[in-house]
Image (cartoon, rainbow, N blue to C red):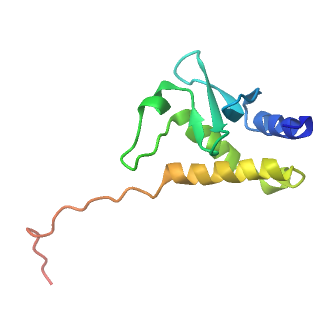
Amino acid sequence: MSTHLRAQIEQIAAQIGSSMEPDTDQYVNRFKVESSSSSSMHLVSQKRSDGTWCCSCRGWTMHVDPQGRRKCKHLTDILRRLADLPAPALATMDPAVLEMIASARTAFLDLGGSAPIKRRRSTAARQVDL
């Protein structure tokens, strides 16, 4: 990754209240996140191989929802903050950075899914006087 590209991603991390860790052979765009329930730090990052977003916390590694998605509060929070970046702040960014932001927005929407459907009680026993 070029130093210019890295500087732009670090600038975004600062805008969303995070910091960056160096990329590894397996992971890129590694955002450092402080736990809200302990003093530990977690890393929200993208897999280099397929661009999938993940988190280093136990919740992400252990939780799979009924749709087969992994999620945790750290991942959801960072992706939300990336998705909420205003367009003017991104106007001068490198295309690779914009691609990372687009990926975060898509991942955030995927995590949110659709609103749960509220089940209504059966109306079979209900009488309606018209």
Decide: is 68 above or below 16: below
Task: Say which quadrant the C terminus sits in.
Answer: bottom left
Q: Residue at x 64, y 45 (%)?
A: 51
The quadrant holding residue 6 is top right
The quadrant holding residue 16 is top right
Residue 59 horizontal/vertical position (percent): 46, 29
Residue 105 horizontal/vertical position (percent): 65, 52
88 left or right, relative to 100: right
Label tally? 0
Q: Residue at x 50, y 35 (%)?
A: 72
Residue 40 horizontal/vertical position (percent): 58, 17
Instruction: State the residue lying farthest toward the top.
Output: 39
26 left or right, relative to 112: right
Decide: is 51 above or below 95: above
Give the camera-side residue of 56 and 77: 56
Task: Say which quadrant the N terminus sits in.
Answer: top right
39 left or right, relative to 121: right
Give the camera-side residue of 119 and 61: 61
Give the camera-side residue of 120 and 83: 83
11 left or right, relative to 55: right
Give the camera-side residue of 129 and 2: 2
Residue 45 horizontal/vertical position (percent): 65, 35
Q: Residue at x 10, y 70 (%)?
A: 124
Q: Residue at x 65, y 39 (%)?
A: 46
Instruction: State the residue lying farthest toward the bottom.
Output: 130
